[in-house]
Image (cartoon, rainbow, N blue to C red):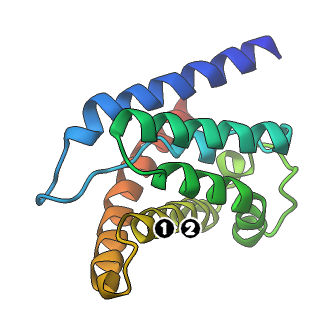
Amino acid sequence: MINENLKSSFQFALLILAQIIVLDNINLFGFLNPIIYILFIITYKFDKNQTIFIFLCFSLGFIIDLLSQTPGANTISCLIVGYLRPFLINFAFKINSDMPKAFINDPNISHRFLYIFSIVLIHQLIYFSIIYFNFNSIYLIIKYTILSSIFSFILLWTLISFYKSL
């Protein structure tokens, strides 16, 4: 139990540092910044306390917002994705969200693909909707959401396949 909490804490800190130090400085095509800190939300154990998980999602987004000086967009998008995660698990895997590590042990790749891509897409849509909070910016919101989601998904899929082999 203590080992799992220590591992989660290390992953939490490492993902924040990697996001702030390395990935926030990458501007592919001038506007694409990949996100990997939601890997914590994706890989967090399903059988843990949901209230603590929502608090961790808030802390994750809040720390990223403080360090990258964004106006609360990461906090709101992490909170909403953290809240919607049990519904997304049920949608993708057609199982109860209380089943532990279903996405790692599931042999069907389409379930994992749907789960990860839906979390990334919802996070990015909320994030860019808050950043460009204007009805005239719908084209920018859709463009940045789609391109950033694809780029982030490829990076996350690669990291999760590495994570799975550990």
The answer to whether 54 appears left or right of 65 in the picture is right
Rendered image: mark on residue 121: 1
Task: Give the x, y percent position of residue 114.
Answer: 58, 68
Q: Residue at x 30, y 81 (%)?
A: 137
Question: Image point 86% across, 38% down: which residue?
Answer: 49
Q: Which mark is residue 39?
A: none
**Mark 2 surroundings within 10 Å by alpha-carbon count, few (fewer than 14), some (14 through 19), many (20 or more):** many
Q: Residues within 10 Å of mark 1 (few under 14, many from 20)?
A: many
Q: Is residue 131 left or right of residue 31?
A: right
Residue 117 placement (x, y as % from top left): 51, 64
Quadrant position of residue 147: bottom left
Apparent side of residue 49 relative to residue 35 in the rendered image (left or right): right
SS assignment at label 2 = helix
Q: Give the answer, above or below, for where 9 lies relative to 56.
A: above
State the residue in front, 52 or 6: 52
Question: How many angstroms separate mark 1 from mark 2 (CA)?
Answer: 5 Å
Numbered-mark total: 2
- Residue type indicated by callout 1: Leu
Q: Where residue 100 appears, x then y in whole percent?
A: 81, 43
For label 2, the residue is 118
- Tell me: residue 33, above or below residue 94: above
141, 87: nearer the viewer: 141
On screen, 82 above or below 119? above
Give the x, y percent position of residue 34: 32, 50
Q: Residue at position x 37%, y 48% from top? A: 70
The answer to whether the residues at label 1 and label 2 have Cβ atoms under 8 Å apart is yes
**Which quarter of the rendered picture does the N terminus lie within?**
top right
Image quadrant where one finds the C terminus: top right
Element type where label 1 sits in the image: helix
- Residue at 88% from the left image edge and 50% from the top image edge: 98
